[in-house]
Amino acid sequence: MSHCVFCAIIAGEAESSVVYDDAHTIAFTDIRPFTTGHLLVVPKTHAANLSRLDPADGERLFRVGQQLAAALRESVVAAEGVNFFLADGVAAGQEVFHVHLHVVPRTPGDGFGLRGRPTAPPRADLDYVASSVRGRLGARGE
């Protein structure tokens, strides 16, 4: 594994502003926040992408994210909403190759947002994709 900034943070070798830390998970402020209070939740066991992430670590990421979302609403940030974002792979925008969950506090007019397609695809196209994904779930034996 090449140098991983999140592993360095976990090891105490790199600076961070920690908001949560337990035996399996750490959360800290993002140094390039989308909005004020933007946090990253990181498993302490290195996994470059979701296919390598232990399911228990994934569960903990979202559990901690949920706790942080509540804390952001009650903190000085005064979030009125929260977005979770997890990029898996270069095409999805992943820049640090250690799985991490973005917890992004939202307030009206904060300027951050995700944009979808302007129109919905035909139902037949949606059904085709759904069928293909369902088929791959069965192929994984789950």
Image (cartoon, rainbow, N blue to C red):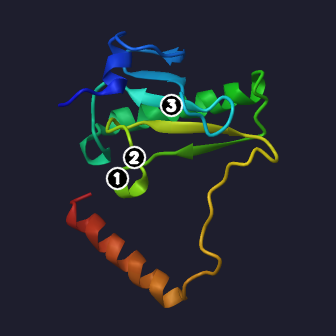
| Residue closest to the eye, 113 or 81 | 113
Residue at the front extreme, as displayed: 32
Mark 2 element type: loop
Q: Position of residue 94 (x, y in %)?
A: 39, 46
Query: Which residue, given by chain and number where applicable, does mark 2 sit on?
Result: 94
- Indicate the quadrant where residue 23 lies: top left
Q: Position of residue 49 (x, y in %)?
A: 30, 44
Q: CA distance from mark 3 to mark 2?
A: 13 Å
Q: Position of residue 56 (x, y in %)?
A: 34, 34
Check disc 2: other Cα within 10 Å, few if <14, some if 14-19, many if 20+: some
Residue type of the residue flagged with mark 3: Leu
Going from N to C along the chain, the mark reached first, 3 or 1, is 3
**Residues under numbered marks 3 and 1 in contact, where contact means CB atoms less than 8 Å apart:** no
Q: Which residue is mark 1?
A: 90
| Foreground pick, 99 / 57 | 99
* Neighbour tally class for label 3: few under 14, some 14-19, many 20 plus, Cα within 10 Å: many
Query: Residue 129 or 107: which is nearer the viewer?
Result: 107
Q: Residues within 10 Å of mark 1 (few under 14, many from 20)?
A: few
Rendered-image quadrant of the N terminus = top left
Q: Are marks 2 and 1 in contact (CB under 8 Å)?
A: yes
Check contact, mark 3 vs mark 2: CB within 8 A: no
Helix, strand or loop under label 3? strand
How far from the left and from the top, in percent, is residue 124? 48, 90
Residue 68 versus residue 106 in the image, above or below: above
The residue indicated by pointer 3 is: 40
32 left or right, relative to 94: right
Q: Amino acid at mark 1?
A: Val
Q: In the image as oriented, which residue stretches furthest toward the top? A: 12
Question: CA separation, marks 2 and 1?
Answer: 5 Å
